[in-house]
Image (cartoon, rainbow, N blue to C red):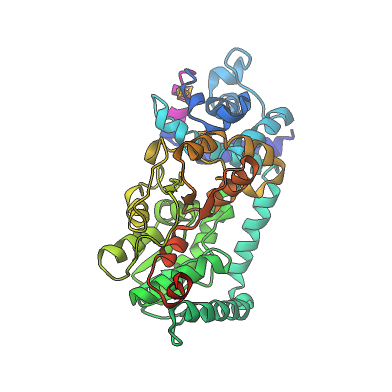
Amino acid sequence: MDAQTIETITGVIDKKMTRQLKQYLDICARCAICKDACHQYVGTGDMKYLPARRAELVRQVYKKYFDAAGRFVPALYEARDPDENLLDELYESCYACTGCRRCMYYCPFSIDTQWVVAVGKAILIAAGRGQEMLGQLADAAIFKGENAEMFRDVLVSGFKDVEAEVREITGDPEAVIPVDKHGAEILYVALTGAHSIRPAAVIFHEAGVDWTISLFEASNYGYFFGDAEKAKLIARRFMEEAKRLGVREVVVPECGHAYRVADIFYEAWAQEKLPFKVSHILEVVDRFIKEGRITVEKGRIEGRVTYHDPCQIARNGGIFEQPRNVVKALTDDFVDLVPNRAEQWCCGGGGGIVAIEEMRDVRLKSGTKKVEQLRASGASVLACPCENCRLQIEDLNELHGLGLQVRQVIDLVVEAMPLPKNRQTSA
Ligand code: SF4
Ligand code: SF4
């Protein structure tokens, strides 16, 4: 490896090194308790997916350049150059990590492997080895942000198509999907696709909310890629839009990482206090049901329903009860997966891995625990408020013949509302 690349890598490590990160690198007792917590290690039995091993690779590079003993006697202090072999292993272990932080939950020292993995990805990017597809998707989103006017007409025409469906579902010929509405109460930032807009628009319409839709999507491939600057630029597109429109609340859709980026990371990245609150759509729906702003009726959802806690919303976002309140308002036949809430098993679909075709095999193997949980629940419907989790669980559903309906929670909510279209269906 040439001196220039080494300099770039060490510069990245130096920039990311905080006292807490240094502590994570120093205190690991190699007790391996984390191995039983990681769905990927449990599903594959492959050492490179052991959480402590992922961190070990970063630690080896750190010791080589930032630790006096490691610099002078590398063999004794397990210090290592970021050679091609190390980078190969780092690539496989870091881009496979779903960032679920279940290992941290069980680690006696609460070592945040996901944080260390983020440094691993930064090393890879500095060495020109960042994951290509995630990088391209991130750059495309940034380009869209810089050239918003170029995409505007296509987007607005797509919203009009969905608006026609919303009118049909609600029976209100005046129902609208407002765009660029100044002073609206809520800015809803959807995912790409009508499936993320239609049910939310129906719910906002029925709740009588003054809302408007974002011209940008919530998903953030810069975060998955491991480049905080790109991730900030992608999220900034709708944060600036929300400021321009003067909304009181930004609502993110059923997407785990989008919620974590917008509500937990963004203010620190942008070093500013946002003048509005950020909510997950199910926090908002729970509020609407409690306030009587929307009505849902039990008995419309057939079969036993269970709920998957997406890691970024639940363990890493603290949203446990609001989605359960919503689902329980729809059915009397609800059963929780075991374990659940903070101890929930990661499905194996987070961290951008669903977009990395070469990691399909490890992704599917790492769903073993989720499959066991789903089978044991006896449920026929899975309410799942995260797009990546749904994609992964759909694949597991097909592969293992689970016979589950994997559903967006807001779709289930709309199905349980006394709307003209639902009345026709049940008649
Ligand atoms: S559980 Fe924590 S201390 Fe033990 S090996 Fe894993 S990361 Fe290290
Ligand atoms: S964050 Fe999740 S996927 Fe990554 S090492 Fe920890 S348990 Fe495994």
Taking depth in this image into account, of 237 and 420 the one nearest to the observer is 420
Check the picture and name the quadrant holding the C terminus. bottom left
Taking depth in this image into account, of 282 and 313 the one nearest to the observer is 282
Taking depth in this image into account, of 266 and 1 the one nearest to the observer is 266
Q: Please identify the quarter of the rendering in which residue 300 is found.
A: bottom left
Viewer can see residue 226? no
Residue reaching furthest to the left: 291
Taking depth in this image into account, of 6 and 223 the one nearest to the observer is 223
Kindly identify the residue that appears in the image at 52 percent across and 65 percent down.
196
Residue reaching furthest to the bottom: 174
The stretch of residues the image draws in magenta is 22-30
Residue 200 in the image: above or below residue 115: below
Viewer can see residue 251? yes
Residue 18 in the image: above or below residue 65: below
Q: Is residue 197 left or right of residue 210?
A: right
Residue 426 spot, x, y in % from top left: 45, 70
Task: Report if residue 312 lies within the magenta region.
Answer: no
Task: Report if residue 25 lies within the magenta region.
Answer: yes
Kindly identify the residue that appears in the image at 47 percent across and 76 percent down.
169
Residue 379 spot, x, y in % from top left: 46, 45
Q: Is residue 273 left or right of residue 393?
A: left
Residue 159 spot, x, y in % from top left: 55, 77
Kindly identify the residue that appears in the image at 46 percent across and 80 percent down.
178
Residue 369 spot, x, y in % from top left: 52, 34
Check the picture and name the quadrant holding the N terminus. top right
Kindly identify the residue that appears in the image at 55 percent across and 56 percent down.
220
Q: Main secondary structure of the magenta part?
A: helix
Residue 29 in the image: above or below residue 337: above
Q: Is residue 416 left or right of residue 288?
A: right
Q: Count all numbered tags in the image, as a single digit.
A: 0
